Amino acid sequence: MITTEQTYETSPQLVASLKRYQLIATFVGLVGFLALIAGIFTEGAPQFLRSYLVGLYFWFGAGMGALVMLMVHLVSGGAWGMMVRRSLEAASRTNYVMWLAFLPLIIFAPQIYSWAGPAAAGSKIVQAKHLYLNLPFFYIRYVIYGVIWLGMTYFLNKWSRLEDQTKSPEYSRKLEKLSAPGIVIYFFTITFASVDYLMSLDVTWFSTIYGFLIAAGQALTGMSIIVATLVFLGKYTPMNHLITKRHLHDLGKLLLALVMMWAYLAFSQYLITYSGNLPDEVSWYVKRLNGGWQWVGLALLLLHFALPFALLLSQSLKKNPHTIFRIAILIICIRVVDVFWLVEPNFTSLARPVFTISWLDVVAPIAFGGLWLALFFRGLPARPLLPLGAPDLLKALAHGREH
Amino acid sequence: MSVRMIDDFQPLYGLMAEFETATQLVDAARRTREAGFKKFDAFAPFPIHDLDEAMDLHDNRVSLFTLIGGLIGCCGGFGLASWVEGVALPLNIGGRPLIAAPMYIPITFELTVLVGGLTAAISMIIMNGLPSPYHPVFNVERFQATGSKNKFFLCIESADPMFDREMTAGFLESLEPEEVAEVAR
């Protein structure tokens, strides 16, 4: 087993490589955002805001998913989490910028959220929901989310750094004590946030399982990015001789569980709507299962559930770094389609749904991807790749090499 | 070190070495396999993950049986629901098609898990050779006393083509065990 402090140091090759990817990501992000801004003039502000929401919510979800998985690890322990904790922390630190990136949606809410616009004034449904869906409260909620999410991100990262520096168990306890209620708070806030930013796009529709569905998707996005990152880090010192097949196996099992959880929640929502068959509830699916949108739904069923599920059942595919990397990338790509499917069909006509996709829907996830990855690659080498002050580190490293 | 012998009139089942740690057992199993022995088994009080690799065990038939069981449950569940609602008792429920597939998914899922799980458990038990009311290794006193508590054992059977009473005992002693004992059949 490796015990010397020396081997935990991030190799200069890795730092250089991360630097290069950070530059590429920054460049892609810059070009992407210039294209997005150009899109305001060619496609109009409403389409810009929708595509902006697709790109932003996907990558915002990656950071939030990482945050909640980090808290799950801090509460429950486990070797899988020790190997990816620093990546999870670096990913969670993107939340600061991602939260700020919501500002255009907040400021121009009337352009995208029909309940905030002038057309809503006469609608009975909007008036009935006015107590919650009104602009001042919408702004207040945005600030509350920010305080809670960024507060949790800040303290988890700060105490983790202090745990490293002082090697004192005091901070490990603090991390645990924040994480346990943090998970509960995360589920509450993400439920409200998903109602605010996604569900209220279709103001007449509601679903009580929606928040959990969004949370499962975020955790899946976050973990897929983290798994892909771990395989990438595994090519360089120090991770190349620290990662074992058991770590990858455990992370693969986690991906399988999250894929199944997403499918379970997505299907539950559909089944309940299908059983009830009420006009208020089916509208969401009428739009999404007609006029070409049904192919997107089928793609989600096959590529978001069936294919990753079947692949992740195999033990050897989970243990092989190349295959688990590809499965993670597949999940990341199909997650973008899922967010697209949550946002865009809201704007089609209920009487005659027609599939539409703007080039901005493709550019926005790439632009935000550049921004997010640039932040992520900048944050990764800032600290040692393993939590050296964590109490169970050596036990986690011995996982899969018990002889 | 001396080998704990059995009486001359007793037929020999094999030779068994006792180890202090799981690590020693995994090493011993690897070296036994590398020495060319085929019929040997390792005994530990708890599951050791690397042991199957060290012993070169690649029998994954339980997964295959589980998959088959799961598929049978899947088709059975969906088939049962479709037959009941479509053939045996066709009912128009709220204008939905007779075969309302989404409604059948829960029972399809449940039966997949049930049949798959039962197949996994039953095939695991059968393929482990259980229930096994008698096993010769229990003839060794030390095994009876500590085999399911805190010691690790490796037994080479006399049925192995390479088995030789003295040579094999010498080989086991070279693995530096706590004790080597002959096992009566």
Image (spheres, coloured by chain):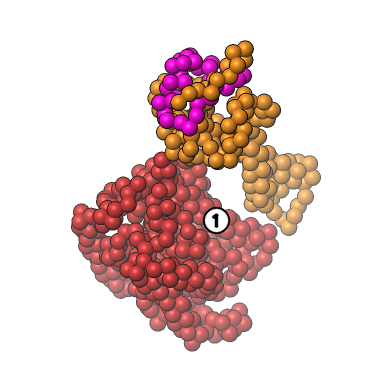
Chain colours: A red, B orange
Q: Is residue B166 magenta?
A: yes
Residue nearer the viewer, B59 or B158: B158
Q: Is residue A76 above or below residue A184?
A: above
Which residue is at the far top? B9
**How many numbered circles are shown?**
1
Element type at marker 1?
helix
Q: Is residue B165 above or below residue A295?
A: above
Q: Amino acid at mark 1?
A: Met
Q: Position of residue A164 (x, y in %)?
A: 34, 66
x 38%, y 79%: residue: A103
x 67%, y 65%: residue: A278
Residue that badge 1 annotates? A261
B172 to the left or right of A209: left
Q: Position of residue B60 (x, y in %)?
A: 52, 32
x 42%, y 52%: residue: A395
Q: Report the chain holding disc 1.
A: A
Q: Position of residue A322 (x, y in %)?
A: 35, 44
Q: Quadrant of residue A275?
A: bottom right
| Residue A75 shows up from this direction | yes
Residue nearer the viewer, A238 or A36: A238
x 62%, y 66%: residue: A281
Quarter placement of the N terminus of chain B: top left
Q: Is residue B76 above or below residue A77?
A: above
Which region of the structure is painted magenta? B156-185
| Residue A252 shows up from this direction | no
